[in-house]
Image: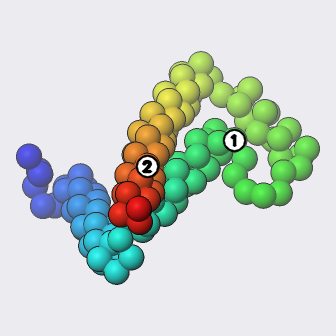
Amino acid sequence: MFGSPASFSFGALLVAMVGWLVAALVTYVFFVFTGFLTIGVIGLLICFISLRIELESGSIVGTVSSPDSFRRQVERQQAMSRAERAAARHEQSLTARSARFFLNLGIALALIGFGGFIYYQL
């Protein structure tokens, strides 16, 4: 299931598992001290990050956008072959699918967190 320990996929999976474990522990600690409000705030944070990733996928990333930057991006896209454009579209669709999943997760966490907060306050 995990592959050999020397393979890259095992290392990436291990890093992902440790990252999720740390995130879960931090969320649990915040939940213990502040209650459902933390879950709602974390849900909003996940929504913000996933929307930002979705909006910036396949385009210029950053706050400063100039006509020269857009021109270079269009020229780079026009210089691509059909196979490269198809690969880029496929990568963008995978990014959009992942961003949509995390957006839905963030919305669910926000609803659960703020709903639980309101329920226990009444």
In the image, 29 versus 95, the foreground residue is 29
**Residue visible at 28% across and 71% down in the picture:** 28
77 left or right of 24 in image: right
**Residue visible at 69% across and 52% down in the picture:** 61
Residue 92 percent location from the top left of the image: 54, 34
- Residue pushed farthest right? 67
CB atoms at circles 1 and 2 under 8 Å apart?
Answer: no
Secondary structure of the residue carrying numbered label 1:
loop
**Of marks 1 and 2, which one's residue comes earlier in the chain?**
1
Residue 36 seen in render: yes
122 left or right of 49 in image: left
Residue placed under numbered mark 1 in the picture: 59
**Residue visible at 28% across and 66% down in the picture:** 24
In the image, 26 versus 36, the foreground residue is 36
Residue placed under numbered mark 2 in the picture: 111
1 left or right of 17 in image: left
Secondary structure of the residue carrying numbered label 2:
helix
- Residue pushed farthest top? 82
Q: Residues within 10 Å of mark 2 (few under 14, many from 20)?
A: some
When the figure is inspected, residue 93 is found, relative to residue 40, above or below; the finding is: above
Q: Quadrant of the C terminus?
A: bottom left
Count of labels in the image: 2
Q: Residues within 10 Å of mark 1 (few under 14, many from 20)?
A: few
* Callout 2 amino acid: Leu
* Callout 1 amino acid: Ser
